[in-house]
Amino acid sequence: MAGSGSDVTEDSDDSAEREQTNSSESDGNLRKRQRLTRASTRLSQSSQGWRHTPDLKRSADHDESPPLTPTGNAPSSESELDISSPNASHDESQAKDQANRDLEKDLSHRPKRRRCHETYNFNMKCPTPGCNSLGHLTGKHERHFAVSGCPLYHNLSADECKVKAVSREKQEEEMKAQEENQSRHATRHQLLAYFCAFVSCQQEHRQTHSNTREPLLENITSEYDLELFRKAQARASEDLEKLRIQGQITEGSNMIKTILFGRYELDTWYHSPYPEEYARLGRLYVCEFCLKYMKSQTILRRHMAKCVWKHPPGDEVYRKGSISVFEVDGKKNKIYCQNLCLLAKLFLDHKTLYYDVEPFLFYVMTEADNTGCHLVGYFSKEKNSFLNYNVSCILTMPQYMRQGFGKMLIDFSYLLSKVEEKVGSPERPLSDLGLISYRSYWKEVLLRYMYNFQGKEISIKEISQETAVNPVDIVSTLQSLQMLKYWKGKHLVLKRQDLIDEWKAKEIKRGNSNKAIDPTSLKWTPPKGT
């Protein structure tokens, strides 16, 4: 019994030891599994830490997690990790998948980072002993991980690298600026040399051919533009040739054949020095109020829609009925007077005054209607004439000729001479029509004076003082009428009654015409200095 009891005791002891051993082995396996789970979690987190820095910091802050190595892997031992165990590999894969899912949830709302300096692995270090991986040899980066970018390896500091980088940038900018200046100066010198050569070539061409040839146009612009210009020249020449064939342009000095003036189209008689681009036209378009000349009827129509002039500039010194006379100062209204002279030269042969209009006064006669004051004619006179000329140039527009307006202009000029208490005479030479008009006027003045004369003796001086006609003009008119005779050493004025009766019959037949100047309608005082 004793033996059996001892056996029982020994069996119980052995069972107790086996149970203790089994419990200790189960506890050890449980602890191994827990360590394996933590190790696999740290391994997955460390593998994700290459792309996400905050997870590294979060794993580093964990009390139980060991520090990471420079490669990003957690330390492990054969006693802690049994990779060959199938249970361990299964648990490791489950832990890794769970960690990846949690990481994707945490980072799903964050944008992807693309900047280079944020892709650094701050656990990497420069292999140079004593270097903290800060700075870069180029001075453009904050960190480095190789010997090629290590400032310490090249016996420099990070600040010195930055300073050298700034100085290199400045030098590069200066070099670029110098190169640009040099290229610019080189281009200027080339252009200057080319321009000098071009000018010398043009001068030689001009000396050889004077103004009889067109200037050299090569090397001025591109060949394409030059070809376009040549085509335009050919087309303009063809159009001019068509106009020449149609008779609108002639080769003579009188290039302008007709002018459109108001509602009249007038044929020109003589050449007028209009600008060349207008003179070569067959027809000229002139505004009848401001006398501006234009190239086409379209331009004239647009001008008339905007022109505000309805009468000549200056002061209106005479008005009776629809007839008015305006005094225009050539100094105050230079452009208008110049245009008036150019227009008058189309119908006058001996006129030489075109642009020097400042020393003259222009008296413009107009006829008014509901559209404005239309130009009838004009005469000009010097402000200070030493020979007492009361007319320098006189013109009646062709559409108003043979209607008595010419005599009205002449009578008005002598009326001004009477107000000035002077004896006047027109400036010579007179045109053919002007001479005819003046002789007709002088004849009418003399016959009216003799018709009204009641005395016995007639004096040429008295006739001149009363009519303001120059004695020379009176004598020449008396001679043409055969009313001046030389008898016994004296000149006698014969009163031919037949001529007086003929003149009186014409006056009665003419009736009370409005084509006469009324002295009471004149509102004028002589200009100062005359």
Image (tube, rainbow, N blue to C red):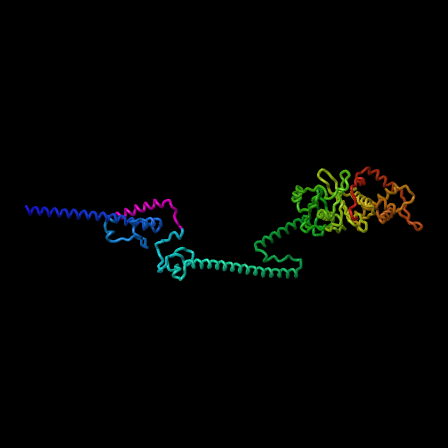
The quadrant of the image that shows the N terminus is top left
Count of numbered tags: 0
Q: Which residues are magenta?
A: 91-114
76 vs 320, left or right, is left
Q: Residue furthest right?
A: 488
| Nearer to us in this view, 165 or 61 | 61
Residue at 81% across / 37% down in the picture? 512
512 vs 205, left or right, is right
Q: Answer yes or no: is residue 143 visible.
A: yes
Q: Is residue 347 above or below residue 134?
A: above
Q: Answer yes or no: is residue 346 visible.
A: no
Residue at 60% across / 53% down in the picture? 229
Residue at 67% across / 46% down in the picture? 294
142 vs 63, left or right, is right
* Residue 443 spot, x, y in % from top left: 84, 45
| Nearer to us in this view, 151 or 99 | 151
Secondary structure mostly taken by the magenta-highlighted segment of the chain: helix
Residue at 64% across / 57% down in the picture? 214
Q: Is residue 63 magenta?
A: no
* Residue 18 spot, x, y in % from top left: 15, 48
* Residue 49 spot, x, y in % from top left: 34, 50
Q: Residue furthest left?
A: 1
* Residue 504 spot, x, y in % from top left: 86, 40
Q: Is residue 103 magenta?
A: yes
